[in-house]
Image: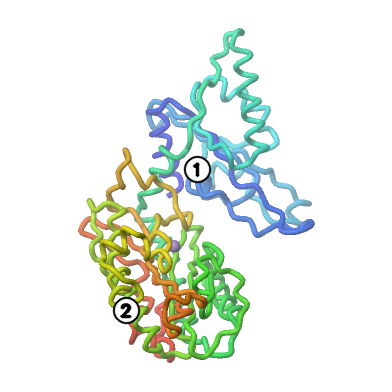
């Protein structure tokens, strides 16, 4: 799969008459001399399937696939370092294991690059990822320009990865979808387990730990982003990640958490009652969000613009808020004067892939992009009524609901990759009572 990605990108580079330079992510210090668990850069992973730190991929396109060349710079084997910090693939094994044409020691990168790049006028390189690498590359390009008088053809243009590589990443192959389905399956088990095990008196942190445990024990690469485990009014803080408060009897619990599988993400939100039974007001708000989400999903198909999904979600939320008496006016007036924004203040979704907010343009030539088969997006409307909002009756305050699924656009319409996670009111209450077991939970 990674070799195919590399060849497709090399075909694009060939048309652009550009070479490409892709670095994986640097390690990041957590504190003192301890790093965060390493996670490779998504572009680099997409093109290599190689997860070690300190590596750089150089792609040199030829006129056709037989003439394309890929060169990987990576760390050499080192018994002492491997004893301390983990196994390494090593230079000798890299061509066979990863399918690259050549492999060299990463320590030689900056002495080899002048020779490699001197023939290329256009280089695809993403600036702004790492200041040190940016500076080294700019110095290198400058020194090659200064040698131009000596007959060297210097690089003159740095091109961004977005229009080429990120357009490829936007369309998922069957093999990539296999990873995304696996991520969705692990996430399904985690959400169902949370519904089953949550009880009044537990702390958000216990549910958070259950999610991480489920993600990791199924062999995923962990959470695709920091879990949001928000009880009661904490759900009204959109990126609440403290996850350390007790869960009250009678409150809702909003969980926004998705597993990765080989670094491919899922991204799911469910909201359910801590004690297993929705109150009248909670259910009324929940059903508005659910109806809005389902209406937005049901209209998806190739040819539909991305922002139709946001618009349809918004209309559903606004209609419901008007019906509950939480807003005054008409659908048109409320959307026009933006009075809905106090209850619904975010967009209804985003692309999903190796990154949870995946790459790919949302607008083309100034217009919202039209959906095509192979794209995956989230649909995630919500309603958030702050606990200090004195413009609404007290019974509504502190209710926060979001429902989010991962939707694949297909030839004939759409497929919900996370459809097995309960979201109808009776299904959610059944899952809270322990009556639902996920497919993964049965021993997958
Ligand atoms: Mn999302």
Colour scheme in the image? rainbow
Q: Is residue 216 above or below residue 47?
A: below
Corner quadrant of residue 146: top right
Residue 161 visible in the picture: yes
**Residue 444 in view (yes/no):** no
Cβ atoms at labels 1 and 2 below 8 Å apart: no
User: Disc 1 or 2, which lies upstream in sequence?
Assistant: 1
Tell me what residue is drawn at x 37 percent, y 88 percent.
Answer: 280
Label 2 SS: loop
Looking at the image, residue 55 lies above or below residue 64? below
Q: Position of residue 92 (x, y in %)?
A: 62, 42
What is the x, y in percent for residue 212?
57, 72
> Residue 245 falls in which quadrant of the image?
bottom right
Label number found at residue 99: 1
Label 1: how many residues lie within 10 Å, few (<14), some (14-19) or many (20+)? Answer: some
Element on which disc 1 rests:
loop
Marks 1 and 2: which is nearer the front? 2
Tell me the residue at 52%/62% (across/down). 224
**From mark 1 to mark 2, how far is it between C-alphas?**
60 Å
Residue at screen point 70% across, 46% down: 77
Residue 6's disc is none
Measured from the top left, where is residue 342 in percent x and y? Answer: 43, 66
Q: Is label 2's Cβ within 8 Å of ligand 1? A: no
Q: For this rendering, which residue is in front, 321 or 2?
A: 321
In the picture, measured across the screen, residue 331 lies left or right of residue 162, that is left
Mark 2 Cα-neighbour bin, 10 Å: few <14, some 14–19, many ≥20: some
Say which residue appears at 36% left-offset and 64% top-offset. Answer: 379
Mark 2 — residue? 324
Question: What number of labels is visible?
Answer: 2
* Residue 294 placement: quadrant: bottom left
């Amino acid at each position: 799969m990674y070799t195919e990605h590399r060849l497709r990108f090399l075909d694009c580079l060939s048309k652009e008459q550009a070479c490409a330079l892709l670095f994986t992510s640097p390690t990041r210090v957590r504190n003192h001399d301890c790093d965060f668990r390493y996670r490779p850069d998504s572009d680099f992973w997409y093109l290599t399937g190689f997860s070690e730190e300190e590596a750089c991929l150089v792609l040199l396109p030829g006129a056709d696939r037989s003439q394309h060349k890929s060169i990987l710079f990576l760390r050499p084997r080192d018994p002492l370092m491997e004893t301390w910090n983990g196994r390494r693939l090593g230079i000798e094994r890299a061509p066979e294991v990863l399918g690259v044409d050549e492999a060299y020691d990463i320590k030689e990168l900056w002495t080899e690059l002048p020779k490699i790049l001197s023939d290329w006028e256009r280089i695809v390189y993403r600036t702004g990822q790492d200041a040190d690498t940016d500076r080294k590359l700019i110095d290198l390009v400058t020194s090659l320009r200064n040698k131009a008088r000596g007959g060297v053809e210097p690089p003159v243009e740095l091109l961004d990865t977005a229009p080429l590589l990120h357009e490829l990443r936007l369309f998922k192959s069957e093999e990539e979808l296999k990873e995304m389905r696996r991520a969705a399956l692990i996430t399904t088990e985690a959400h169902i387990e949370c519904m089953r095990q949550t009880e009044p008196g537990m702390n958000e942190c216990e549910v958070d730990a259950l999610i991480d445990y489920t993600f990791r024990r199924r062999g995923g690469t962990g959470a695709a982003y920091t879990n949001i485990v928000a009880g009661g009014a904490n759900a009204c803080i959109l990126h609440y990640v403290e996850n350390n408060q007790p869960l009250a009897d009678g409150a809702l619990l909003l969980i926004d958490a998705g597993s990765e599988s080989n670094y491919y993400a899922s991204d799911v939100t469910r909201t359910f009652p801590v004690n297993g039974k929705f109150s009248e007001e909670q259910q009324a708000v929940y059903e508005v969000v659910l109806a809005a989400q389902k209406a937005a999903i049901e209209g998806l198909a190739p040819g539909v613009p991305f922002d139709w999904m946001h618009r349809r979600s918004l209309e559903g939320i606004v209609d419901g808020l008007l019906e509950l008496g939480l807003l005054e006016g008409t659908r048109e007036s409320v959307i026009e004067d933006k009075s809905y924004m106090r209850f619904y203040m975010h967009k209804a979704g985003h692309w999903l892939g190796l990154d949870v907010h995946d790459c790919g343009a949302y607008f083309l030539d100034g217009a919202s992009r039209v959906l095509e088969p192979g794209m995956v997006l989230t649909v995630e409307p919500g309603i958030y009524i702050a606990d200090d909002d004195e413009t609404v009756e007290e019974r509504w305050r502190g209710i926060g609901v979001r429902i989010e699924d991962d939707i694949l656009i297909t030839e004939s319409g759409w497929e919900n990759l996370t459809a097995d996670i309960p979201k109808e009111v009776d299904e959610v209450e059944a899952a809270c009572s322990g009556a639902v077991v996920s497919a993964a939970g049965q021993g997958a």
